[in-house]
Image (cartoon, rainbow, N blue to C red):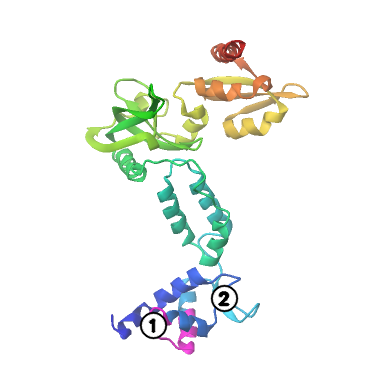
């Protein structure tokens, strides 16, 4: 591209320089901005830089001039604050269902939302390679296909892979094909799940998306979720996730628990605003909420030992008691 043609890119490149190279601790003078533009074969004079900055400010960029610690310009307000960038980075690197290669790629994209200096400081506190990460490189392609199928109300077919231990102790895989009417994708307990209906049954099925392979969108209309659950107008993913512990399928019931006061924040974190709390005595409170009575709920209750007692329903009382008997039997041997 000829030099005069590159001049047409001047404002765009200058905007990128402000976003990538400057922040409140790293400002650039007009002369330094000219030098940076030269790296892109774009010539500029200091006087023209002042005019360009005014145009960029009129466009909406929060370009600030400061004399401390030195004279220069920097980009102030951005689309994302540093704390927001950090939260996004932490969420990506903590998500086990995102493969390592894709984790690095996502972090780089997030980093482009702030200056390279600020992102370098954030990266020092982000650790990836020592975490257990998904190895399914199809996952983002599959998420895209599943999202399209949900939007188009079409069934999907896929292969679901589980790990098994062979007689020799090696980890092997067992693959099974499914056709599902997809309703939602839910991130819960560090896993990403597809919620849908297998036409063979009148209930909901959960499938971990990191275990899904070979997704195909069919031309078969999806079964409406109102036929297999209580939602009629829209599938409420947040409500559903709150009622299904560890994403085990089941019919929600009214559950009443007698809890130690030390568990108050844990209980409210899990049940949210849907829980009705009442003081029971000086050391305990009752929590009443809607939850699916499943082995997932039993496991959640059992981890707190004698700090939680099930008051109702009776079926859940028996399930927790049976779990306690099973644990006792294992250690009695």
**Residue 32 appears anywhere in the view:** yes
The residue under the point 54% across, 57% down is 123
Mark 2 Cα within 10 Å, few/some/many (few <14, many 20+)? Answer: many
> Dividing the image into 4 quarters, which one contains the N terminus?
bottom left
Q: Earlier in the sequence, mark 1 or mark 2?
A: 2
Q: Nearer the viewer, residue 11 or 170?
A: 170
Q: Height in image: 72 above or below 103?
A: below
Question: Hey, which residue is sitting farthest right in the picture?
Answer: 282
Outermost residue to the front: 168
| Residue farthest left in this picture | 219
How far from the left and from the top, in percent, is residue 220? 22, 32
Residue 235, horizontal then vertical, whole percent: 41, 34
Q: Position of residue 296 (x, y in %)?
A: 51, 24
Query: Residue 290 location, x and y as percent?
Result: 54, 24
* Above or below 287: residue 129: below
Q: Quadrant of residue 152?
A: top left
User: Which labelled disc corresponds to residue 277?
Assistant: none
Query: Which mark is on residue 42?
Result: 1
Position of 127 with respect to 170 (left or right) is right
- Which range of residues does the magenta coloring cover? 38-53
The reply to whether the magenta stretch includes residue 277 is no
Residue 61 visible in the displayed image: no
Dot 1 alpha-carbon crowd within 10 angstroms: few under 14, some 14 to 19, many 20 or more: many
Mark 1 vs mark 2, CA separation in Å: 20 Å
Disc 2 element: loop
Horizontal side of 154 relative to 88 (left or right) equals: left
Q: Is residue 212 left or right of residue 53?
A: left
- In depth, the one of 189 and 199 nearer the eye is 189
State the quadrant of the C terminus: top right
Q: How many marks?
A: 2
Query: What residue is pinned by disc 2?
Result: 27
Which structural element holds mark 1? loop
């Amino acid at each position: 591209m000829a030099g005069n043609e590159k001049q047409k890119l001047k404002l765009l490149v200058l905007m990128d320089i402000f976003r990538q190279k400057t922040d409140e601790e790293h400002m650039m003078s007009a002369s330094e901005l000219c030098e940076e533009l030269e790296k892109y074969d774009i010539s500029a004079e200091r006087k023209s830089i002042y005019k360009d900055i005014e145009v960029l400010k009129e466009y909406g960029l929060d370009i600030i001039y400061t004399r401390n610690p030195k004279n220069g310009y920097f980009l102030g307000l951005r689309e994302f604050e540093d704390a927001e960038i950090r939260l996004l980075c932490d969420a990506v690197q903590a998500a086990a269902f995102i493969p390592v290669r894709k984790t690095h790629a996502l972090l780089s994209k997030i980093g482009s939302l702030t200056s390279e200096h600020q992102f370098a400081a954030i990266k020092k506190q982000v650790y990836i390679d020592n975490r257990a990460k998904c190895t399914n490189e199809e996952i983002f392609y599959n998420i895209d296909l599943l999202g399209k199928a949900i939007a188009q109300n079409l069934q999907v077919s896929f292969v679901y892979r589980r790990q098994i231990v062979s007689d020799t102790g090696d980890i092997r895989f067992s693959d099974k094909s499914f056709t599902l009417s997809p309703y939602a994708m839910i991130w819960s307990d560090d896993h990403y799940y597809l919620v849908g209906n297998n036409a063979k049954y009148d209930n909901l099925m959960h499938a971990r998306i990191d275990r899904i392979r070979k997704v195909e969108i069919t031309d078969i209309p999806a079964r409406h979720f109102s036929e297999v659950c209580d939602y009629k107008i829209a599938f409420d993913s947040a409500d559903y996730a709150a009622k299904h512990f560890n994403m085990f399928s089941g019919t929600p019931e009214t559950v009443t628990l007698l809890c130690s006061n030390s568990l108050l924040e844990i209980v409210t974190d899990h049940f949210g605003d849907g829980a009705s709390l009442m003081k029971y005595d000086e050391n305990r409170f009752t929590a009443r909420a809607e939850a699916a009575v499943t082995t997932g709920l039993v496991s959640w209750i059992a981890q707190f030992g004698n700090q939680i007692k099930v008051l109702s329903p009776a079926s859940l009382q028996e399930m927790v008691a049976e779990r306690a008997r099973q644990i006792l039997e294992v250690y009695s041997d």
